[in-house]
Image (cartoon, rainbow, N blue to C red):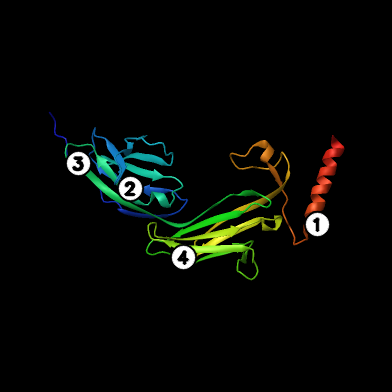
């Protein structure tokens, strides 16, 4: 039998920090792998994420980047697409040998995640959740903006903003509430952390039936509403007039 050198890991970063929504690359480079297999797992879980180039979990964000380099070196990097805070943790690149050979990589996801419905019916509530994280410490503050204007209790009296710190996630969470929405609440909402990270979400208040308006997954055709945007600060009479004219044209065409 010929001599087969023992595989070993080459020096690569063991701490990786990426912003939420970006591509995370967890490096794993091995020399003299030979015919042995490489598997990725997450510490604390009893199953592999990948074995070889195959992904063994249903999460499509995970992909193996396999490359053969000079000097009998192969890369087995674990890629995580559109990474979110929940992927923060310790991962293990393992070689299939009798004696366990592994290398750990810690992933930290920082930045802001902004969640909430993009479309709401007029009169329904608007609820946006902004989750901000940082590499070294929990962000100190989160500010909210609508169409570039900072949201405060004087100018936006109908908007309620709450904030709390999550020690488990090492993040600052801020929630924005509007109890009864009107068309004037349509617009671009932005949350910004004290770390200068920002995220945005466009919210549209739907006010009339139409087959031409985009809807969220799960809505039926009868639930679909037309989005009438307030391009200027006019009275509600303008909105009602638009709806009346649109309805008159539809009846005339029938």
Q: Residue at x 39, y 40 (%)?
A: 63
Task: Pick out the residue farthest to the top.
Answer: 1
Q: Are marks 2 and 1 in contact (CB under 8 Å)?
A: no
Cα–Cα span, label 2 and label 1? 60 Å
> Alpha-carbon neighbours of circle 2 within 10 Å: few (<14), some, or many (≥20)?
many
Most distant residue in the right direction: 252
Location of the N terminus (image quadrant) = top left
Secondary structure at badge 4 equals loop
Q: Identify the residue at image location x=56%, y=55%.
A: 128
Q: Quadrant of residue 109?
A: bottom left
Q: Residues within 10 Å of mark 3 (few under 14, many from 20)?
A: few
Q: Which residue is mark 2?
A: 27
In the displayed orientation, state which residue is furthest to the left: 1
Callout in the foreground (4, 2): 4
Q: Give the percent coordinates (x, y) of residue 136.
A: 37, 64
Whether 67 is drawn above or below 134: the answer is above
Tell me the element at label 1.
helix
Mark 3–mark 4 CB contact (< 8 Å) = no
The alpha-carbon separation of the residues under discs 3 and 2 comes to: 19 Å
Determine whether label 1 and label 4 are within 8 Å by CB.
Answer: no
Q: Residues within 10 Å of mark 4 (few under 14, many from 20)?
A: some
How many dots with numbers? 4
Which numbered circle lies on residue 108?
none
Q: Nearer the viewer, residue 82 or 4?
A: 82
Of labels 3 and 2, earlier in sequence is 2
Which residue is denoted by mark 4 in the rendering?
A: 195
Horizontal placement of 190 versus 233: left or right? left
Q: CA distance from mark 1 to mark 3?
A: 73 Å
Mark 1 sits on what residue? 237
Helix, strand or loop under label 2: loop
């Amino acid at each position: 039998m010929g001599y087969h050198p023992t595989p070993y890991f080459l020096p690569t970063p063991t701490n990786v920090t990426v912003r939420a929504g970006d591509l995370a690359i967890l490096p794993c480079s091995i020399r003299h792998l030979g015919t042995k297999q490489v598997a990725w797992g997450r510490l604390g879980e009893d199953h592999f994420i990948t074995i070889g180039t195959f992904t063994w979990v249903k999460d499509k964000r995970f992909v193996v980047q396999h490359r053969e380099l000079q000097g009998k070196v192969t890369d087995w990097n674990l890629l995580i697409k559109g990474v979110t805070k929940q992927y923060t943790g310790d991962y293990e690149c393992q070689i299939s040998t009798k004696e366990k050979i592994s290398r750990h990589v810690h992933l930290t996801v920082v930045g802001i995640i902004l969640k909430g419905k993009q479309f709401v019916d007029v009169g329904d509530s608007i609820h946006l959740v902004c989750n901000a994280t940082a590499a070294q410490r929990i962000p100190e503050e989160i500010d909210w903006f609508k169409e570039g204007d900072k949201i405060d209790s004087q100018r936006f009296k109908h908007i309620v903003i709450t904030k709390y710190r999550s020690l488990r996630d090492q993040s600052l969470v801020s929630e924005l509430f509007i109890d009864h929405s009107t068309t004037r609440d349509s617009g671009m909402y932005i949350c910004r952390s004290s770390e200068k990270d920002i995220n945005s979400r466009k919210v549209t208040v739907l006010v009339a039936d139409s087959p031409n308006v985009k809807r969220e997954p799960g809505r039926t055709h009868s639930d679909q509403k037309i989005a009438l945007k307030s391009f200027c600060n006019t009275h509600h009479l303008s909105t009602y007039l638009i709806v009346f004219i649109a309805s008159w044209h539809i009846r005339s065409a029938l």
